[in-house]
Amino acid sequence: MATNLFDIRRVAFANATFPTSNSTTISTSTGVYIPKGAIITGVKIMAGDALSLSQLSNLTFNLYVGGQVIGSANNIASAVFVETVANQFNLVATAGIRIATGGNLILHLGSGSSVTGGIVADGDIYVDYLYCDDRDDK
């Protein structure tokens, strides 16, 4: 039996702070949990109060749910974390990503092509996802 549930579309919110320097792999958990079976339909990112990303030329970053990557390989921090503008985060699959195992949302920084010291940045991350508690395959 189908029902019209208004709790299916959800938005998770996290604020992630960049560490003060970037090595080739830094991961930081946001403490935001995305459940198993959720379908991520989009991610928007907005820079927070503090922003100094000029040192991060070509710094790649990605988002994970637990160990599952949800972003494509071409997300560049200085292009997406922009003050005053909400930007689209590129997903692995544009139609949506089904989360195989629930887990915390994790921001993973890659490496940049210029000086990486003195990073000052935090970003608000909005994850749109579909999830129904009543599904029988949880």
Image: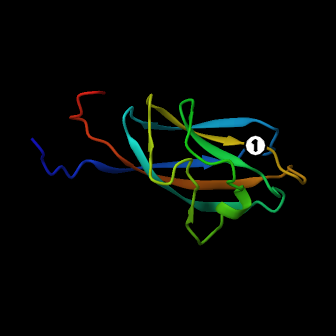
Using residue 55 as the reference point, say whether residue 84 is left or right of it: left
Mark 1 lies on residue: 110
At a point 18% along the width and 49% down the height, the residue shown is 5
Residue 100: where, in percent of width, then height? 44, 30
- Quarter of the image with the C terminus is top left
Instruction: Give 74 or 15, whichever is nearer the viewer.
Output: 74
- Secondary structure, mark 1, is loop
At a point 24% along the width and 33% down the height, the residue shown is 135
121 lies above or below 104 = below
- Quarter of the image with the N terminus is top left
Instruction: Give 5 or 21, whichever is nearer the viewer.
Output: 5
Using residue 88 as the reference point, say whether residue 132 is left or right of it: left
Identified by mark 1, the residue type is Gly
**Number of callouts:** 1
Residue 115: where, in percent of width, then height? 90, 53
Residue 14: where, in percent of width, then height? 51, 48
Residue 13: where, in percent of width, then height? 46, 50
127 lies above or below 27 = below
Callout 1 environment at 10 Å: few (<14), some (14 to 19), or many (20+)? some
83 lies above or below 37 = below
